[in-house]
Amino acid sequence: MVLHARTYPVIDVPTPAQIVEEALERAKDLNNDNSMILSMGPQHPSTHGVLRLSVELAGETVVNLAPDVGFLHTGIEKTMETKTYTKSIVLTDRIDYLSPLNNNFAYCAAVEKLMDLDVPERAQVVRVLLLELTRIGSHLVWLGTHALDLAAMSVFFYGMREREYILDIFEMVSGARMMTSYFRIGGLAWDTPKDFIPTVEQFLTYFLPQVDGYEDLLTNNPIWLQRTRGVGVISGEDAIALGLTGANLRASGVDWDLRKTIPYGTYETYDFNVPVGQNGDIFDRYRCRVQEIRESVKIARQAVERLKGLEGAPYVTPNRKVAPPPKSEITYSMESLIHHFKLWTEGFRPPVGSAYVGTESARGEFGCYVVSDGTPKPWRVHFRSPSFISLQALPHMAKGRLVADLVGMIASLDPVLGEVDR
């Protein structure tokens, strides 16, 4: 499907208060016998986070619903205004906590664009490799919990088993398994260890056959097909009108992946395909993400081969006004010592202006908008979170379906509530 320059209809999503009010009016007409309001969450085993759904039911059929968010609000964007640009990086890990490195990248890339800062090739390659491993790890959590929501337990255990290898790789390069804060403005925090490339190669060789095992359990499973095919359908036009991105958009037949359409981080130099569905149902969203896992393995292997030819190359910008000098220089260079001291006490000062960088995270377009007033601290930082936007598709998908299907619809959108509330 080709995107055309046309206006798509705006789909209004009612608030929880409006749903309750409308339901009460209908309930009066029905003599209070055929309609009820169910509060699903915010502590519910199948809402993939602290999410509350206000659901209007007629028997077991969903008449209407509205997501009620904000239970996990942490004020990250406002807090970043009080920290220097470098110190703000640690906050980005906590937004989409299943894709922390992608959060790091979006923020660092926006600041780099604001400062017109070049990043060394080795750092670019390591970033792409780790971003794709992050995508795989995030999709494994989605796949396992999605299957668990529909009573398929084995896939969850297998997915968590493989994800442990990815977290071990993150720990190898950053010292942390989840909140890595490994990317820096201008490159990486430090170089990768000697065992990094062999470890990644070993994982990729082991991992790909495991994906076949996941599909053996689910793709042709009659129960899985019955619970996913034709359920939670979103057309391509409606997906665009709702602002969906990522696999949720591509499953509806819209070929849109920022790594291809608006390339960033040298993705235009990698060979990979973009899986696109046809029906826009839960099954197509499942198939798109599973195929994305295979494509991420393909990208990661290309990045590993490039890294082998970049041994010893710089991993961070040589600009001493942005990146701290090596510790070895500080012992004999007073200028280096001054730069190091000023960077960690005052921070650097980007020019006045603003920049936006959109990235293709595991959940869709995760973007970072940074505004600088010329001081060492950002004047404004805002994140475009795909999960927040994906949730507004739930009422559109759920109307007329059974409440039992609602759990599968939520899982198929793959929301992360830390990213929704921020």
Image (cartoon, grey):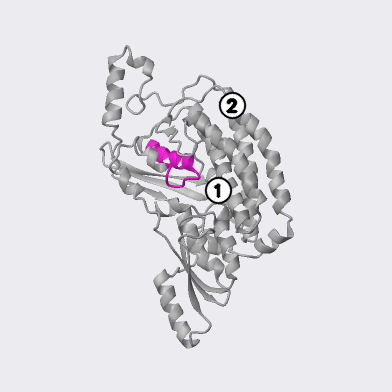
x 58%, y 42%: residue: 136
Q: Nearer the viewer, residue 313 or 177?
A: 177
Q: Label 2 near label 1: C-beta < 8 Å?
A: no
Residue occupied by mark 2: 197
Q: Is residue 140 visible?
A: yes
Q: SS for tag 1? A: loop
Q: Nearer the viewer, residue 239 or 402?
A: 402
Side of 352 relative to 315 (left or right): left
Q: Residues within 10 Å of mark 1 (few under 14, many from 20)?
A: many
Residue 251: x and y in percent read: 61, 56
Q: Residues within 10 Å of mark 2 (few under 14, many from 20)?
A: some
Side of 7 relative to 382 (left or right): right
Residue 286: quarter of image: bottom right
C-alpha separation, residue under disc 1 versus residue under disc 2 = 27 Å
Residue occupied by mark 1: 257
Residue 420: quarter of image: bottom left
Check disc 2 and give the amino acid type.
Answer: Ile
Which mark is first along the chain, 2 or 1?
2
Q: Is residue 369 magenta?
A: no
x 28%, y 17%: residue: 335
Q: Nearer the viewer, residue 8 or 109?
A: 109
Q: Is residue 236 visible?
A: no
Residue 185: x and y in percent read: 39, 33
Residue 368: x and y in percent read: 40, 46
Residue 62: quarter of image: bottom right
Q: Taken as a whole, is the magenta stretch helix, strand or loop?
A: helix
x 56%, y 57%: residue: 411
Check disc 1 and give the amino acid type.
Answer: Asp
Q: SS for tag 2? A: helix
Magenta residues, start to end:
93-113
